[in-house]
Amino acid sequence: MQLLNWIFGTPANSSGSLAKDRMRTMLVHDRLELPAGRLEILQEELLAVVQRYFELDKETTQFDLQQYERRAALIANFRLLRSKC
Amino acid sequence: MSGRVIVITSGKGGVGKTTASANIGVALANTGASVALVDMDIGLRNLDILMGLENRVVYNLVDVVEERCKLRQALVKDKRMPTLSLLPAAQTRDKTAVNAEQMKKLCIELKNTFEFVIIDCPAGIESGFQNAIAGAEEAIVITTPEMSAVRDADRIIGLLEARKDEIEQYRLVINRIRPAMVKSSDMMSVDDVLEILSIKLLGVVPEDEEIIISTNKGEPVSGTDNTRSGLAFRNIARRLRGEDVPLMDLDAPNSTWISRLVKFFAPVARV
């Protein structure tokens, strides 16, 4: 997509695409009635739990709320290095 | 007869609910259907103005509900189309004047007489909205490609979703789209809005100065042949009747022979 934008000269950081990105994040929070900051707390807690069992690569840990139809999905991606104990 | 009761709603004010109600009503009547337009924006009556019928209002919806008159006495016949009638809102009352039960009863009475009952819903998500959707089986959600309108539309869709038993289907109309701004990526596109809201599309209406002129005249654009917004609303009416009508090409200018000539020579001029 970015390549297409580049070829056809559509700026990737145009205000339209900025609006779309902001809308996506906002609506996922709206629909779940999710207060700001709550996700960050969950992320820390989840990380702590996984770290009890595994050593992991913190740099590549991903944590995302994505939209599927009108539902949200929580996508967490932990790169595991080795199990503990 | 059992007609279809369709509520036109948006959450946010000023996105074109009343304009859409008037135009879809006129366009449906133009296809030969009998149509009742119901103004549920009690206290902020406007549909009569858009229809050019403000001087003919005698009774209103609240008079009917409170049994000061018969339904047929309150219905105002359209000037041009005999199959189109308006049930005006009360101007001096507020949104608590009619409750959900009364609205359901009124809708049943209306759909016994009309093939389409189009309800113009007030802005907001409180009692006025809840009452307006009380008797409806279908909803049309209006938005513009602006963030605040899309967010409010999303809220409305959530509320409609929660009433799946009563509201069988709801579809989206994206109003006031500006093709040039979409092209330069400074406005969310139809696809962007659809992806964000995940809802079926009923139609797209381009921004059109003719709307302001038509409101001044009290003659909705969908009643005339030569406007892009009018064509968009007529397409919406045909889709409501089950026809498969493709979306209009938003890029096509409202072409006059001059604009066609300019377009023809434009590529040459740039070289």
Image: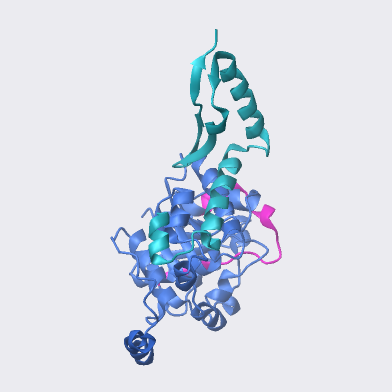
Chain colours: A cyan, B blue
Relative horizontal placement of residue A41, taking residue B204 as reference (left or right):
right
**Picture coordinates of residue A42, whole percent (x, y):** 63, 28
Relative horizontal placement of residue B251, taking residue A37 as reference (left or right):
left
Q: Which of B91 and A70 is in front in this view?
A: A70
Q: Does the magenta portion include B104?
A: yes
Q: What stretch is highlighted in magenta?
A: B83-106
Q: Which of B110 and B143 is in front in this view?
A: B143
Number of marks in the rendered image: 0
Q: Nearer the viewer, residue B30 or B18?
A: B18
Which image quarter: residue B12?
A: bottom right
Q: Does the magenta portion include A83?
A: no
Relative horizontal placement of residue B57, taking residue B204 as reference (left or right):
right
Q: Seen from this angle, which residue lies furthest top?
A: A85
The N terminus of chain B - image quarter: bottom left
Residue at image x 54%, y 23%? A56
The C terminus of chain B - image quarter: bottom left
**Picture coordinates of residue B210, whole percent (x, y):** 49, 80
**Picture coordinates of residue B200, whole percent (x, y):** 40, 52
Residue at image x 38%, y 73%? B251
Q: Which of B145 and B56 is in front in this view?
A: B145
Q: Can residue A68 be seen in this view?
A: yes
Q: Can residue B68 be seen in this view?
A: no
Residue at image x 68%, y 63%? B43
Which image quarter: residue A45?
A: top right
Q: Seen from this angle, which residue lies furthest left?
A: B244
**Picture coordinates of residue B172, whole percent (x, y):** 45, 56
Residue at image x 37%, y 92%? B258
Above/below status of A77 relative to B102: above
Above/below status of A62 relative to B161: above
